[in-house]
Image (tube, rainbow, N blue to C red):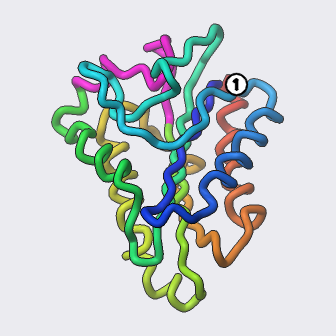
Amino acid sequence: MLVNILYSTPPDGDDASLTYATRASELCTCQDGVTLGYVGQLAVNDDGGADLPWRIGDNNMHTTENVHQVLTIFLVSCSADGSVNRNVRKIMRKLPKHGDAANSVSKCHSGVAEVNCPRYYAIAALGHARCENSANQMAEIIFGTARRVDKLLAGSGFFDIGPAPHFSRLETQVELCGPEKEFDPWLKRLMNPVVERN
């Protein structure tokens, strides 16, 4: 399995997304059957005729032999007021609508030169509320954009969607709880079922 990790900082630039991306990449390198692909900031793919609306590395393609499936993990930082990095919004606009999804599937490579392998994604929404009361009362506002990204990705046709609860979205408040409490267990659930299918 090939794992790509794309992270976005919030508009103010101060957050834990790089730390979380580093943790995720370290866990991936410890897993048998997992190849770490691209790890970097979520960037808009402005190449004309590009398959994906986001970039996967410098050449936008990670070629590796024996890739049986691809998992792309999106780490989306969400400010306390719900704002996200502008690249997240640009990519949302570039994602095909549900009706155009069938055309996307045939073109999608998910960063791998292997069209027939299953492609999955997972989203961790990294909230930045500073008190538990605000985190609970403002969850819809804080995580609203990440939830919309999740729905758009599911309908885009770029990924195989199936009855896989272990690919559910994580919503965590990084200012209130450490990654070992929610993020690490979520990541391990992502890795284990996928590795078993390889």
| Residue 115 lies within the magenta run | yes
Q: Position of residue 115 (x, y in %)?
A: 43, 14
Compare residues 168 and 127 and report the one nearer the observer. Answer: 127
Q: Quadrant of the N terminus?
A: top right
Q: Is residue 196 above or below residue 113?
A: below
Residue appearing at x 36%, y 62% in the figure? 145
Q: Is residue 162 above or below residue 84?
A: above
Residue appearing at x 20%, y 41% in the figure? 97
Helix, strand or loop for the magenta stretch, by majority: loop
Residue hosting label 1:
35
The boundaries of the magenta stretch are: 103-120
Tell me if mark 1 has few (under 14), some (14-19) or many (20+) residues whose alpha carbon lies within 10 angstroms of its own. Answer: some
Number of disc labels: 1
Q: Position of residue 89 (x, y in %)?
A: 31, 52
Q: Is residue 43 above or below residue 86?
A: above
User: Which element is circle 1 on?
Assistant: strand
Compare residues 126 and 42 and report the one nearer the observer. Answer: 42
Residue appearing at x 77%, y 42% in the figure? 27
Q: Position of residue 155 (x, y in %)?
A: 30, 42
Q: Quadrant of the C terminus?
A: top right
Question: On the image, which quarter does residue 53 sit in?
Answer: top left
| Residue 175 lies within the magenta run | no
Q: Position of residue 46 (x, y in %)?
A: 30, 30
